[in-house]
Amino acid sequence: MTIQAEPRAPQRAASPAFPHAITDPSLVPVERYFDPGFARREKEKLWPHAWQMACRLDEILRPGDFTEYRINDQSILVVRESADTVKAYFNACRHRATALGNGSGTFHGGQIVCPYHGWRWNLDGSNSYVYAQRGFAPDCLAPDSLRLRECQVGIMFGMVFINMDPAAPPLATALAGIAQALAPIGFERMRVRWWRHLVLPANWKMAQEAFMEAYHIMQAHPSLSMGAADDDYDIDVLGGNFECFAGGHAHLLPSDGSVPVPGMSVADYFTQFNNALYVGTDAYATDREMFLQQSLAERDIDPNEYPKAFFEALYQYAAGAGIPLPPPATGTTGYAHIFPNMTVLPAYGNSIIYRVRPNGDDPESCLFEVWAVQIPAGSEDEPDPPVLEGPIAIEDWPQIFKEDFRNVAAQQKGVHTLGLRNLVLSGRYESMIVNNHRMIDEYLSR
Amino acid sequence: MTRRPARVRVEPAGIDIAVAAGESVFAAALRSDLTWPTICYGQARCTACVLRVVDGHQNLGPLESVERGVLRQLASRRGRRPSRDTRLACRLTVTGDVTVEKKGAQPNPPGARPRAEDPERLA
Ligand code: FES
Ligand code: FES
Ligand SMILES: [Fe+2]
């Protein structure tokens, strides 16, 4: 794997700086997935200092709209302050700690009101009212002590990122490399088709790692390997060329466009891959692409030229329907990981987006969310904020997700077995995972 | 789907406000620069925003469980059974023109921010 020297050269500890640190990049100590001490270390040293996606911008469209972001035992209110500013506040009244908001909603009249004794704040975090102030010592009423405590906020990809650490470098620095690599994808133009979640019986890292490599396709997803068994299925074609960044992010570089399944034409592979994901994920490819494939089926196209014909039809259709598709990305497939806990799989102006968080303090349970997003036809109206569905049981997910989630649960069982000390990672096919652990350890050793 | 905003007449001030689809009467009133009694600012907690529906009942949006619970408490506080004329402005949506009565709803003095009022001073 290649690592770019920005923003800071990766450091690797020669001897473990803390329990269960990684000393050989291809070996991951199993305790990282269940040890409460390790989870505590992440709680102290990773989550309060790392930039993380708190919500999508389209969840808080209008001034006063808010949503609550939770991570470990922290609750943060993300608030739309004005048409173009967003704030994030620790969700606690400055009087006696009462949480000021719950779930999502709107603070009307520009006022955040404590339900307990009625203290109030403007959307910019400044205090606007203290009931019966005469009863408080003057120091307690100083504007600075009354002001809501803030997190740093950064906007990218149509998402709101927060950082609880006031000393953390800005989002653009933390996302150096991946921000540029993914810019051509047009995430900020996409809107939510659906947003679903489940609680998985696994460590948050274990769960997300199922989506951070394509190496499992041959065995785990028959609908995607299409009958190619063992080494007949050429993983190097769509899962062997990652670019990793110093900040813990990575993305998959484009391949030469050859087919990983021997004997299959480019046209057959291309269409069946889309069909399998359409049925198996209800995302990635959507009705839009299925419709295009159907209309192309009636034309006589050289099988080797099929992708070219498909993209021509796609851009023609988009232009007619007023869908602002960005030009095709040439420097990335878009398949990427954003440190520490997001993975994206875009295609054709659509994307699957994953976010995984620990479930409270339990190192063996996580909240796993999936968004299916798509660039909609241009129109004046913003759709209503997306609504989270679920939790949805593993067996009720579409086939491909089900195959992945079942493996995650089985892995979490396996890490406890005696005699297993490490997971083994491929430096080529699983480098996105290797790079994420490397960056986690940078945080944990600080 | 968009439709033309509904017109809600607020008595006794005699003011008309435009209420968009899905918008609460309270949010529309603040947007239209009215003072509307509140101390929770639209969180369905304080009951200060409560109004009486005078006309256009067929155009009222649904009564959801949070609002129903708050209205029930309000009624029992006043020793009555809930009336279908009583709604929380901060939860009431409308699908067409409606006339409501709300004392204390009035145009903002220029430059003023919305004011909190005594919660017991009800419609
Ligand atoms: S706890 Fe918030 S006002 Fe008292
Ligand atoms: S504004 Fe407080 S209940 Fe409606
Ligand atoms: Fe998978």
Image: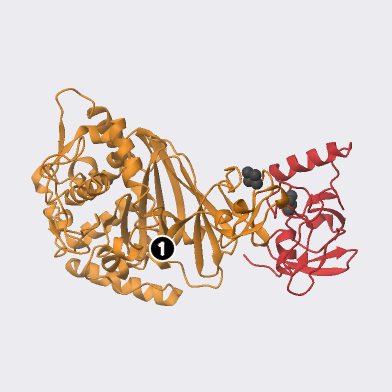
- For image coordinates 71% across by 58% down, the residue present is B24
Residue B76 x %, y %: 84, 36
The amino acid sitting under disc 1 is Gly
Q: Residue B44, image x and y in percent? A: 71, 48
For label 1, the crowd category at 10 Å Cα-Cα, with few meaning under 14, some 14 to 19 and many 20 or more, is many
Q: Ligand 1 sits in which quadrant?
A: top right
Determine if residue B52 is in view. Answer: yes
The residue carrying mark 1 is A154
Quadrant of res B32: bottom right
Residue in front for this viewpoint, A426 or A357: A357
Q: Position of residue A241 (x, y in %)?
A: 14, 58
User: Left or right of A304: which side holds B55?
Assistant: right
Q: Is residue A161 left or right of residue A19?
A: right
Which residue is at the far front? Answer: A138
Placement of A209 over or under A320, stated as above or below: above
Chain shown red: that is B
Measured as percent of width and height from the top left, residue A38 is found at 28, 35
